[in-house]
Image (spheres, rainbow, N blue to C red):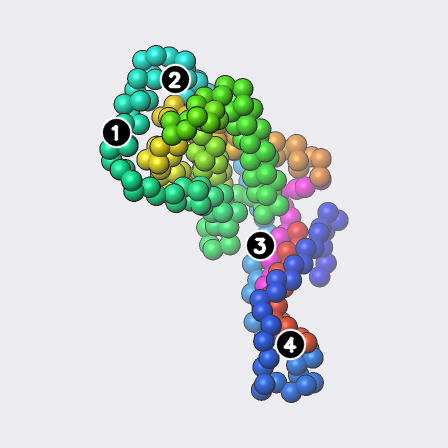
Amino acid sequence: MKVSKMGRAISIALLCGFYPIPSLSAQTETSVTDSIFVTHERAVKPVSDSPTSFRPTQLILPASLIAVGTFGVYNGFFRKMDVSIKEGMDNLRGNHYFHADDYVQYLPIAAYIGLDYIGVRGKHTLKERVVVGATAYIAMAACINTLKYTIREQRPDSYTRNSFPSGHTATAFTGAELVREEYGTWAGVGAYTVATGVAFLRLYNGRHWFNDLLAGAGIGILSARVGYWMLPLYRKWFGWSNGNMECMALMPSYGNRTLAINAVYVF
């Protein structure tokens, strides 16, 4: 297969299992490749750089959420509202906890990487989505952990002082904003619904104050935008262009009594 100057080929063999197949002769069993060959191939067209271009107005929403959330740590009136919300959630929950938020927080980022391969057309190649997502989550993690261990707000359900801001909420909202930027409004609505559900469950399970969620959401949105703002630099540094061809193929194979699936990605 001919690949461009900056092309790369990545092949990963995923072991699916070991088991004998009696119907295969010894000769056939040595090396057999299934006829199924699933590919995903497309020429990536140049797209508008609007999501990757910094605009001051993009700071308004996340900065407002972070500012209000931080204000809530120190303001007496806001703290009374936090306590009132916590008491309402305690009455609603009783002893029935629901910890799906520990897992659902990762659904938006999974959608961000994978929606393009189930028919929802994205704006960027897989390699670009990966570096944007990685940048966004590195920025988010750095910001969240710096604030947690600087402000040291006590959690509502324990004496642990790492409540502000909510990391689960930031994780979910980072993915949601990435989905919105990459796939458009309707996909973004779905991702933001999931992210809001994660934030609600952090309150429901008594793990965070309301202001923690506001700041976490703001940090998540801002981190996703940082990832896209960095993309033009990555293109320049790595010599990427918007007109490359990318191709993914899945090839089931059987040899030496081992069943495997080989995934090949070429870009």
Q: Residues within 10 Å of mark 1 (few under 14, many from 20)?
A: few
Q: Residues within 10 Å of mark 4 (few under 14, many from 20)?
A: some
Label 2, label 1: how far apart the Cα atoms are: 18 Å
Front tag of 2 and 1: 1
Q: Magenta stretch containing residue 56, yes or no?
A: no
Front tag of 4 and 1: 1
Q: Is residue 134 above or below residue 82?
A: below
Residue 20: quarter of image: bottom right
Front tag of 3 and 4: 4
Closer to us: 215 or 267:
215
Label 1, label 3: how far apart the Cα atoms are: 51 Å
Q: Quadrant of the N terminus?
A: bottom right
Q: Secondary structure at mark 1?
A: helix
Q: Magenta stretch containing residue 244, yes or no?
A: yes
For this view, does 217 lie left or right of residue 141?
A: left
For this view, does 87 lie left or right of residue 43?
A: left
Q: Sequence-wise, which precedes: disc 1 or disc 3?
A: 3
**Badge 4 amino acid:** Arg
According to the picture, the residue beneath numbered tag 4 turns out to be 257
Q: Secondary structure at mark 3?
A: strand
According to the picture, the residue beneath numbered tag 2 turns out to be 72
Label 4, label 1: how far apart the Cα atoms are: 59 Å
**Badge 3 amino acid:** Arg
- The residue that appears at 35% across and 36% down in the rendered structure is 205
Q: Secondary structure at mark 2?
A: helix
Q: Is residue 224 above or below residue 262?
A: above
Picture coordinates of residue 226, whole percent (x, y):
56, 29
The furthest residue to the front: 159
| Disc number placed over residue 88 in the picture, else none | 1
According to the picture, the residue beneath numbered tag 3 turns out to be 42
Picture coordinates of residue 185, whole percent (x, y):
40, 39
Q: Which residues are magenta?
A: 239-251
